[in-house]
Amino acid sequence: MLAQEDQDEIINLDEIKSKKSFSKYFVMDIGFIINTNQYQNRVYNNRGLSLYGAGGFEISPYLATGISLGYNTYRDGDFISLHLDVRGDLLPLRATTPFYYGGIGYGILTSNMRTAAPTSRIGLFYTYGIGVKLIRHPKMYAMFSIGQQAQYIEWRIPQFSTLGPILPTFLYESIWYYRLAIKASLYIKLTQ
């Protein structure tokens, strides 16, 4: 038979284990993206739409990690991105709290609007930003944020010459699509 002290320690251990369990979360973002495309020597205006879904584990109110799948429209094509999602609250004990988010992964070109061909359909993608989380229900939050998204891709453009051989030469153009992302989101805490 266990002494009362040992029984209290076992109960306290169970309480600690239950407090360390992670909550699952799901986030759905819709955003408007604006800014410029920076080509090697030119800058173009760019507008588009951003749709994202992310799911993972909330380790604490300050840190949650997961995987995000998204769809972005740009001037030169549409991309699907898959990236690591990191987010958290800055002041989690308040009903309305500022939060941060970020992520890094890869974007895959799904439709090409240019006459040039990409050297690879996959390029580096990253995103980060800050926002405000409004608590409306204990397990559901409305969020509004502003941040940046960036997508890299390299294009291969054929260059024909009237004086040279019939075979074309190629110009390679490295492009970062930098965009300001203004998003509205719904954050759902799936388990406690």
Image: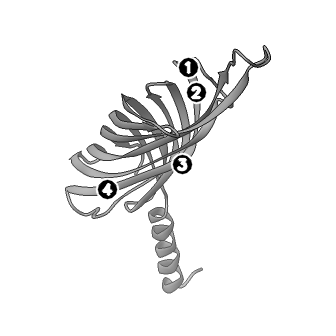
Which residue is the site of mark 1? 112
Nearer the observer, disc 2 or disc 1?
1
Q: Real-space Cα distance between discs 3 and 1?
A: 23 Å
**Looking at the image, which residue is at 44% across and 35% down?**
53
107 left or right of 53 in image: right
- Disc 2 residue type (three-letter): Leu
Placement of 74 over or under 17, stated as above or below: above
- Dot 4: within a 10 Å radius of its alpha carbon, few (fewer than 14), some, or many (20 or more) residues? many
Of tags 1 and 4, the one toward the viewer is 1
Q: Which residue is mark 3?
A: 104
Q: Is residue 190 above or below residue 99?
A: above
Query: x, y (%) of residue 98?
Result: 26, 57
In 3D space, how far apart are the residues under numbered discs 2 and 3 (Cα atoms)? 16 Å
Colouring: one colour
Q: Position of residue 188 (x, y in %)?
A: 36, 41
Q: Marks 3 and 1: which is nearer the front? A: 1
- Measured from the top left, where is residue 186 in percent x and y? 32, 38
Among the two numbered marks 3 and 1 on one chain, the one whose residue lies closer to the N terminus = 3
Looking at the image, which residue is at 46% across and 75% down? Answer: 12
Which residue is located at x 22 percent, y 48 percent?
A: 135
Q: Is disc 2 in contact with disc 1, using a CB cutoff of under 8 Å?
A: yes
Q: Which residue is mark 4?
A: 99
Q: Which residue bears the numbered disc 2?
A: 109
